[in-house]
Image: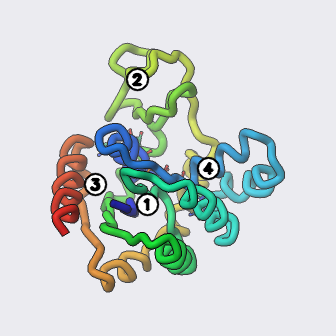
């Protein structure tokens, strides 16, 4: 089963993807994570995208489509979760073509709907484990033991360079201008499911599970 998690910055796409990987053996394809890895490696691609990401703008379609194409070729038995991709109509059309070429299809697109004010709070309170990437929040989801990752026991944490009020404003603008039209695109294809992302993590997870179980029945 291949699914897209669609939603503004901070909607909970990464949080829900990590759970689906663990519980359903799916493979998470996060273009944001791929771009951050490229940055950290100091590659030419990483240098090219660093400034764009820090400003909160979108990286060009050809770069992210190329990254996704590479990963799709590797295959995934449990299916793919597209997290933060596609973000433009051009990317959505490219994904349709890539999947068709591999004899695959999309099974569901899940829109996580969250109010803008809540997004500001989520983004400003977010931190991740430097070791395993587990996502936490200062108040909504702190580590059980202070300063120790629940998952890997790591004690180093980081905050993202683009998690500041100016970048977030631009990221939201990009989302509403370029990504939100995808809601109509996938609705027209009969694939869209809207989930209330304002609910606690566990309730959002249960709703996603219900949708995926339904979709699996065909
Ligand atoms: P990307 O890394 O994809 O960032 P994003 O879309 O802005 O989304 P986030 O990762 O910020 O949020 P999320 O929805 O995953 O929320 P999370 O689960 O962490 O992209 C970064 C940049 O890369 C882009 O700006 C762009 O420059 C570039 N890029 C990436 N893909 C691209 C593409 N396809 N095309 C062009 N450019 C691209 O949760 C957030 C916080 O909230 C956490 O602290 C979490 O603990 C908490 N939380 C989660 N769920 C809940 C809940 N239900 N209740 C309370 N708190 C919650």
Q: Earlier in the sequence, mark 2 or mark 3?
A: 2
Q: Which residue is mark 1?
A: 8
In the image, the residue with mark 3 has its CB under 8 Å from the nearest atom of ligand 1: yes
Q: CA distance from mark 3 to mark 1?
A: 10 Å
In the image, the residue with mark 4 has its CB under 8 Å from the nearest atom of ligand 1: yes
Residue 46, given in percent of the width and then of the height, sits at: 76, 50
On the picture, is 18 further left or further right than 30?
left
Q: Earlier in the sequence, mark 1 or mark 4?
A: 1
Q: Which residue is mark 2?
A: 151
Where, quadrant-wise, is the C terminus in this rendering? bottom left
Q: Which residue is mark 4?
A: 34
Instruction: Using the image, determine if residue 48 lies above or below residue 22.
Output: below
Q: CA distance from mark 1 to mark 4?
A: 18 Å
Residue 159, given in percent of the width and then of the height, sits at: 57, 35
Q: Are dots 4 and 2 in contact, CB under 8 Å?
A: no
Q: Which residue is mark 3?
A: 197
On the picture, is 60 further left or further right than 184?
right
Residue at image point 65% right, 46% down = 36
Q: CA distance from mark 2 to mark 1?
A: 26 Å
Indicate the secondary structure of the residue bearing disc 4.
helix
Q: Earlier in the sequence, mark 3 or mark 1?
A: 1
Q: CA distance from mark 4 to mark 3?
A: 24 Å
Q: Earlier in the sequence, mark 4 or mark 2?
A: 4
């Amino acid at each position: 089963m291949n699914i897209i998690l669609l939603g503004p910055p901070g909607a909970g796409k990464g949080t829900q993807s990590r759970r689906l990987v663990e519980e359903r053996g799916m493979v998470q394809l996060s273009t944001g994570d791929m771009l951050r890895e490229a940055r950290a490696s100091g590659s030419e691609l990483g240098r090219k995208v660093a400034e764009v990401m820090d400003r909160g703008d979108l990286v060009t379609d050809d770069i992210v489509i190329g990254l996704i194409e590479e990963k799709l070729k590797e295959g995934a038995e449990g299916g793919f979760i597209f997290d933060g991709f596609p973000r433009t109509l051009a990317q959505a059309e490219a994904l349709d073509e890539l999947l068709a070429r591999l004899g695959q299809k999309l099974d569901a697109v899940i829109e996580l709907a969250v109010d803008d004010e809540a997004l500001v709070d989520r983004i400003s309170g977010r931190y991740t484990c430097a070791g395993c990437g587990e996502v936490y929040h200062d108040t909504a989801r702190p580590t059980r033991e202070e300063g120790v990752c629940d998952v890997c026991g790591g004690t180093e944490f980081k905050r993202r360079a683009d998690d500041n009020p100016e970048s977030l404003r631009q990221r939201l603008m990009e989302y509403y201008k370029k990504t939100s039209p995808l809601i109509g695109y996938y609705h027209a294809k009969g694939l869209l499911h809207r989930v209330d992302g304002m609910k606690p993590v566990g309730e959002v997870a249960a709703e996603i599970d219900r949708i995926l179980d339904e979709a699996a029945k065909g």
